[in-house]
Image (cartoon, rainbow, N blue to C red):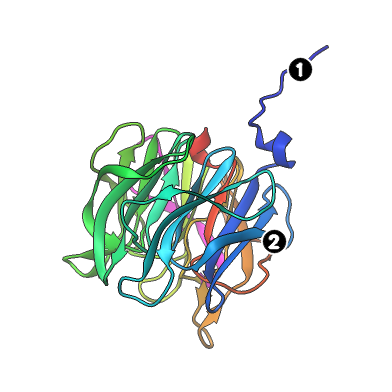
Amino acid sequence: AWWEIDATSPEQETGGARGLFCGGEAPSKDNVIQFVNISTTGDAVDFGDTASSTSGQSAFSSRTKGFIVTGFVGPSPTNYSNAIEFVTIASQGNAQDFGDAAVGIGQRASCASSTRGLMLSGLFGSQQQNNIDSLSMSSSGNAVDFGDIISKSNGGTALASPTRGIMGGGYESPANAFTNRLQYVTITTFGNSAEFGDLTRTTRYANTGANAVRGIFAGGGNPSAQDTIDFITMATLGNASDFGNLDQTASDMHQGAASRTRAVFAGGSHPSPSYTRLDSIRYVQIASTGNSIDFGNLAAGRITTAGISNGHGGLG
């Protein structure tokens, strides 16, 4: 008997889908990348470093490469980086230069298919933005304009199926209000976003994870931290439904990391009894509904760490 093995299979390359958590504040900006094997549980392990210490950065990934994009490198309002760095997910090591975003913007939502990464919305000079940038992940180069989101915002978070990128929540202008808006783009086609539906609550700084069918938005704040977990079916338009709850309220998060079966959320902040940066890692089984389960811990409590994986929903 003989077998043909897909060389891009995360199970063959890393022993299972691998999740990376990049940068953040712990409490100062740092350049640490940590990783977990999503199919197991346990504490995160050191992977390497990014070139700059950042917070509010974006991240997305193909099956082989993870990309860490822009973010705050100094105090607001305009001290942001436009650098795009990459790592090879199956190995460990420091990030390398890939190219540049069109402009340095913090707090961008991001997601990817197997070939294209998207960066949506963000904050520059204390002003919300409506840009969508696109990056071809197969070769080094700079990001290009993709289109615009419906309203300028920051603090939204995103996830993807193989065909759609979907952003949820955020703080929108000119309304100057938290939103429950869900909006989507077709990743293969340049253009502006369109309405998808609504989350069950208004929020920003939620954590996300998806397989190819279902997308999950967990926690966030308005401005108080929340423990709600919502889910959507990405092939159809409509409102989110209740999935369950986090083990504690958590805000100041960004993307999570996902496999075909699990979504893993790391870090964030918890307000009580005083503001605390969390080192918690939690997970849910995407195909079911229910509350989060303890996975392990980061090396230190941190906020705005950005998750990527080689098994997320945009990869099919």
- Which x, y percent locates residue 304? 48, 67
Asked if residue 229 is among those painted magenta in the image, a careful observer would answer: yes
Disc 1: which residue: 3
Q: Residues within 10 Å of mark 1 (few under 14, many from 20)?
A: few
Q: Residue at x 51, y 72 (%)?
A: 249
Circle 2 SS class: loop
On residue 44, which mark appears?
A: 2
Q: Amino acid at mark 2?
A: Ala
Q: Is residue 27 left or right of residue 6?
A: left
Q: Foreground residue, 3 or 202? A: 3
Residue range highlighted in magenta = 228-249
Q: Is residue 291 visible?
A: no
Q: Is residue 15 left or right of residue 249?
A: right
Q: Where is 246 relative to 61, above or below? A: below
Q: Is residue 112 left or right of residue 172?
A: right
Asked if residue 29 is among those painted magenta in the image, a careful observer would answer: no
Circle 1 SS class: loop
Mark 2 vs 1: CB contact within 8 A:
no
Q: Residue at x 56, y 42 (%)?
A: 65
Q: How many marks?
A: 2
Name the residue furthest bottom.
273
